């Protein structure tokens, strides 16, 4: 049986008029779908408000997210509201529909509250219900842990809920409806000349997402790649049934004929740079530093090590999410004796700009183009990191947009 999953983001369900519009889209899509599941986010702005409330109540100011099971009880509530509202709007149109919360789906996660990972999802009752023709309206972003507690999947997690539901249903397609009409060569909100991509490979999308393009949550792309779920990104502000060729298909690399050297440019302002000055230069020091940070749940990204001015000492520079900066600083200050460093500097006004493309595997000179384009704009590079299909640089945050635009032009990505 043909099964389809649709997901609507926060802007698409921002108020009752938009929910009515979503109900029209769902009604139109039901005609062509066999079984239909619709995953919804909270109304835009709601999750931010809920996070603020949870933090305020907990008195938590150390972490960007207060990782607590009660925090999840609060922040998951936004999706409960929209799932019920959409089910009501569908029933009003004479359609059979019901809402499903994370615990009702038995969407099992680990207990890393605030950023839980999906562990498994059987959902037999759910599959039966979808196949019976009842439209399943799923509250995105939420699951349940082994202790029966509500969990949430990290910001943007409804994308991941949608792909998980699509994988469980063995759906033919997972359509992610959002406020842009596809995946662009870079964020269309900051580069007017950004171009919509007809197709993008899972691998490139994974890099784009993890390097800052929030159009899809990174884990949703990971999950789609592992389960080979075809994902399409579409606008919820266009016709009820997508025109042929609308949106962007995230698919296998071999389904893409025209390959670019660089497919996209991403940026992230959620970065902080830590410099440990005068760290003793002997084996095991890096293991202590990054061990302490890992135990504290801080995700470290770029790492550079260089000789310090003092004899027998070195400097270690690394980046971590800015929202973790106060917490990471505390961890390092507490471990000062154990690590043995002279000074710690934390810069929070930095941004990471990255270029991504599978074509890099077989083309030389990609880094050169990047460095020349940035230097032509007088932008200083603080840290560089590379992988097979991306190059990232850390720069002063005030140059972010300038850098993204310059790189977009330098790699020939500008729309005519
Ligand atoms: P939703 O609420 O529907 O989940 P998001 O705000 O999470 O929507 O994601 C959509 C936003 O992602 C767009 O409004 C756009 O500004 C941003 N974005 C960043 N990079 C890209 C990109 N490369 N292509 C498309 N959108 C992007
Ligand atoms: N409502 C959640 C958030 O704002 C999940 C999502 O929208 O995907 O992060
Ligand atoms: Mg999103």
Image (tube, rainbow, N blue to C red):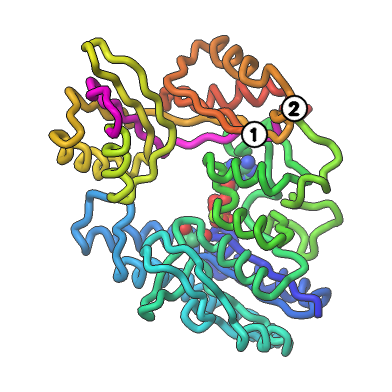
Please indicate, yes or no, whether residue 386 appears anywhere in the rendered image.
yes
10 Å crowding of disc 1: few (<14), some (14-19), many (20+) = some
Position in image of residue 195 (x %, y %): 72, 36
In the image, 318 versus 231, the foreground residue is 318
Q: Is mark 2 within 8 Å of ligand 1?
A: no
Q: Is residue 19 left or right of residue 248?
A: left
- Reply above or below: 265 against 209: above
User: Which secondary structure type mostly characterizes the magenta part of the structure?
Assistant: strand
Position in image of residue 264 (x %, y %): 66, 34
Image quarter hosting the N terminus: bottom right
10 Å crowding of disc 2: few (<14), some (14-19), many (20+) = few
Q: Is mark 1 within 8 Å of ligand 1?
A: no
Q: Is residue 144 left or right of residue 309?
A: right
Residue 13 within the magenta-colored segment of the rendering: no
What SS does tag 2 mark?
helix
Q: Which residue is mark 2?
A: 362
Position in image of residue 175 (x %, y %): 70, 62
Q: Which mark is residue 389?
A: 1
Q: Residue at x 77, y 72 (%)?
A: 29
Ligand 3 is in which quadrant of the figure?
A: bottom right
In the image, 64 versus 85, the foreground residue is 64
Please indicate, yes or no, whether residue 21 appears anywhere in the rendered image.
no
Q: Which residues are magenta?
A: 262-284
Q: Residue at x 65, y 74 (%)?
A: 168
- Reply above or below: 385 against 60: above
């Amino acid at each position: 049986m043909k099964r389809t999953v649709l997901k609507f983001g926060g802007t698409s369900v921002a108020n009752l008029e938009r929910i009515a519009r979503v109900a029209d889209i769902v009604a139109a899509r039901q005609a062509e779908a066999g079984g239909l599941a619709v995953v919804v986010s909270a109304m835009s702005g709601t999750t931010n408000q809920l996070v603020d409330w949870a933090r305020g109540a907990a008195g938590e100011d150390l972490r960007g997210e207060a990782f607590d099971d009660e925090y999840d009880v609060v922040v998951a509530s936004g999706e409960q509201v929209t799932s019920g509202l959409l089910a009501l709007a569908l029933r009003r149109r004479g359609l059979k529909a019901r809402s499903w919360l994370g615990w009702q789906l038995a969407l099992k996660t680990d207990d890393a509250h605030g950023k839980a990972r999906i562990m498994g999802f059987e959902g037999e009752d759910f599959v039966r219900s979808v196949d019976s023709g009842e439209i399943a309206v799923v509250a995105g972003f939420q699951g349940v842990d082994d202790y029966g507690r509500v969990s949430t999947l990290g910001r943007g997690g409804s994308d991941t809920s949608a792909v998980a539901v699509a994988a469980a249903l063995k759906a033919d397609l997972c359509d992610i409806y959002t406020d842009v009409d596809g995946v662009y060569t870079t964020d269309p909100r900051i580069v007017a000349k950004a171009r919509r991509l007809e197709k993008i490979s899972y691998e490139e999308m994974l890099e784009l997402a993890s390097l800052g393009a929030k159009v899809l949550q990174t884990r949703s792309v990971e999950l789609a790649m592992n389960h080979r779920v075809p994902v399409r990104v579409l606008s919820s502000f266009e016709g009820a049934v997508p025109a042929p060729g609308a949106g962007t298909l995230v698919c296998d690399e071999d389904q893409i004929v025209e390959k670019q050297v660089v497919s996209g440019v991403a940026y992230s302002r959620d970065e902080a740079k830590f410099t440990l000055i005068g760290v003793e230069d002997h084996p095991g020091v890096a293991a202590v530093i990054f061990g302490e940070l890992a135990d504290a749940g801080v995700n470290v990204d770029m790492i550079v090590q260089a000789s310090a001015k003092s004899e027998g000492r070195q400097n270690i520079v690394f980046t971590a999410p800015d929202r973790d900066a106060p917490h990471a600083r505390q961890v390092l200050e507490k471990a000062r004796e154990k690590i043995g460093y002279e000074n710690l500097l934390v810069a929070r006004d930095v941004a990471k700009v990255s270029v991504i493309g599978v074509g890099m595997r077989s083309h030389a000179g990609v880094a050169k183009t990047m460095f020349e384009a940035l230097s032509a704009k007088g932008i200083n590079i603080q840290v560089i990191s590379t992988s097979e299909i991306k190059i990232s640089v850390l720069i002063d945050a005030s140059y972010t947009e300038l850098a993204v635009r310059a790189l977009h032009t330098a790699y020939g990505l500008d729309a005519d």
